Amino acid sequence: MRKYPINIFVISTWSYNEPLTHSYLLPYIKVLREVLPVGSHIHFLTMEKDDFPMNEMMRNSIEFAFKRQNIYWHTHHYKKFGVLSVFNYFMLILRLCFIVWKKGIRVLHPFAPVAGSIALIVKFLTRRKLVLDSWEPHAESMVESGVWKQNSLSFKLLFYAEKKLAKHADSLIAASMGMKDYAYEKWKLMPVRVAYRPACVDMEMFDRTYFENKRTRWVLQLQGKLVAVCTGKLHGMYLGIEVFQFLKSASDFFGEKFHAILLTETPSEVIEAMRAEVNLSSEQLTIRKVSHSEIPIFLHAADFAINPQKPIPSKRYGTPVKDGEYWAMGLPIVIAADISDDSEIVVRENVGVIWSTKKEDNVKVLQQLSMLLQDTNTAERSVNAAKKYRSFDLARKAYQEVYASI
């Protein structure tokens, strides 16, 4: 690692109050602060959406707390893709260039390909280094999940940007070991500087020993229940009706003692339509929209967890944040095949079951899950899997490797 200070600019397209910012962005900014030489400054950008409002008092409080750590927070208003967004991004790029020159930024450190495409333009305009974090296929994922069309301008622009990022980024930090193969398969590119960092988990925050099981369930009024938990969206790029079909099958399999906790931002009308379609009793559901800091107590009240990511080809190269959090809390997971490296981990470490997502296979999956739930060592294996595959030591190692040669 270099000994002289280095100023970096972390760029994201998430709002500050989005769960991903707190589970997937801020923890790595903390690690970067630990890894970078003393005297280094970290600037970071969030794209503020109308769905995640923030008052001025809160904003000032957050800014003050970050400045005490040599971290400087910048915001820009987000606009959905369209004519106005083109002008908005043009103004953003100009603003980023100004900050880069004024603050002596040496390295652009975007998270995920969308932010990377913005950083790539800034790189060419300012001649700064670029480290793409969370390198994974996003454009194809949007098409495979049905959010975008393959002939859409959104897909074409981002897919082109992803190719250029693979070619011109000074370093790439992959979410999965398979990204090198993906780059060669899609673009005949073989990037040299590639580090690996999965979605790590804060083992102190997600520590099951901090909670007392009976009290947790008493607070949530879940005494005597067998509880499933599912965090994240249940529409768009994620499974929706399939999750509810599985919950209905679980209700039939386990009986009245079954209960499901859904921690989701999915609109209530969408949730209600899927619940009604499968005829699942509303009394067997707890639906909450919570902050990231509240998630551990709900996970602690559960017996197993569900990963709702769609089993589409591009998901082989991503990395789900939620799986590490589930495992850290001792929960076996229900997950589709070929989701990142995690589906293989589930089988290898015996910390969950593979789910076909087909209604007719749900009973077989539940039978396998029931055996895991009866195994008194399942929780310990799950926690060990989190330590082995989701430790922040992996992030520190990746960042030290990258910034030693940048």
Image (cartoon, helix red, strand yellow):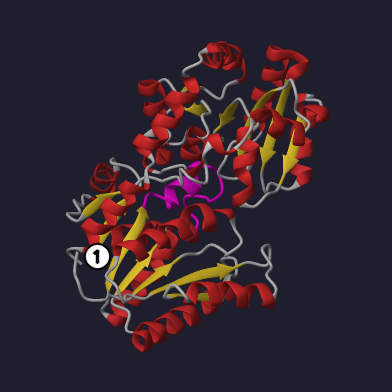
Kindly identify the residue that appears in the image at 50 percent across and 28 percent down: 335
Magenta region, main secondary structure: loop
For residue 217, above or below residue 181: above
For residue 306, above or below residue 34: above
Residue 161, image x, y percentages: 36, 62
Horizontal side of residue 257 vs 79, given as left or right: right
126 or 3, which is in the foreground?
Answer: 3
Location of the C terminus by quadrant is: bottom left
64 or 250, which is in the foreground?
Answer: 64
Magenta-drawn stretch contains 2:
no
Kindly identify the residue that appears in the image at 47 percent across and 50 percent down: 150
Which amino acid type is shown beneath numbered disc 1?
His
For residue 110, above or below residue 327: below
Residue 291, image x, y percentages: 64, 52
Which residues are drawn in magenta? 135-152
Kindly identify the residue that appears in the image at 33 percent across and 42 percent down: 176
Q: Quadrant of residue 214?
A: top right
Q: Is residue 232 visible?
A: no
Residue ID for mark 1: 168
Residue 106, image x, y percentages: 28, 77
406 or 361, which is in the foreground?
Answer: 406
User: Helix or strand or loop: what does disc 1 sit on?
Assistant: helix
